Amino acid sequence: MKKLIILPLLLSNIYSSVIGSIERGKIDKLEEAYALVTRGDEIIPVSKLGFKLRKNDSIKTFRRSTIQIRLNDNTIIKIGKRSTLKIEEYLYNSKNTAKNAAGFKIENGTFQIKTGKIADTTPRRFKIKTKFSTIGVRG
């Protein structure tokens, strides 16, 4: 009986940590991957679409690769060639929107970001850090 209770709790923790996925992109044929994801001490080459992203992942594209990620709140981030993005904070709950938050750090490169529900419900908690930037706001 105890084993049956523990297994669902472990599975819910694993799946709740997924915050989005890589939904499309252009692969770098030399690297045979879309990007590298740094997760803690692990560096993971992303060679297939649908790769699941987690909070604190750092995503780095190659010389000839681009990707598009979609987060759970429907935020869409297009990451250009030779670009690096760190997901520093991400919390989304459609039922309790007061605590929703997103924080990204752009190390270098080009990006297009279409904000989702977090920016609609708690705009002050949607943050992007950069060293330098040029911003074009649309809509």
Image (cartoon, rainbow, N blue to C red):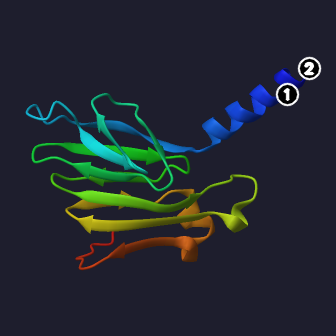
**Could you tell whether 28 is left or right of 35 in the image?**
left
Point out residue 99 in the picture as x, y percentages from the top left corner: 69, 66
Residue at the far right: name it.
1
Instruction: Judge the density around disc 1: few (<14), some (14-19), many (≥20) Cα neighbours within 10 Å.
Output: few
Q: Is residue 32 above or below residue 111?
A: above
User: Which amino acid type is shown beneath numbered disc 1?
Assistant: Ile
Count neighbours of disc 2 (C-alpha within 10 A) and say few if under 14, some if 14 to 19, many if 20 or more. few
Identify which residue, 114 or 29, lies in the foreground. Answer: 29
SS for dot 2: loop
Q: Residue at x 64, y 63 (%)?
A: 100
Assign the N terminus to one quadrant of the image: top right
Circle on res. 1:
2
Mark 2 is on which residue type?
Met
Residue at which label 1 appears: 5
Q: Decide which of 61, 72 is in the foreground and name it.
A: 61
Residue at image point 26% right, 58% down: 84
Q: Are marks 2 and 1 in contact (CB under 8 Å)?
A: yes
Measured Cα–Cα span from mark 2 to mark 1: 7 Å
In the figure, residue 11 lies in which quadrant?
A: top right
- Residue 27, percent from left and from top: 18, 34
Expressed as whole percent of the image width and height from the top left, the position of residue 35 reads: 25, 42
Q: Position of residue 127 (x, y in %)?
A: 47, 72
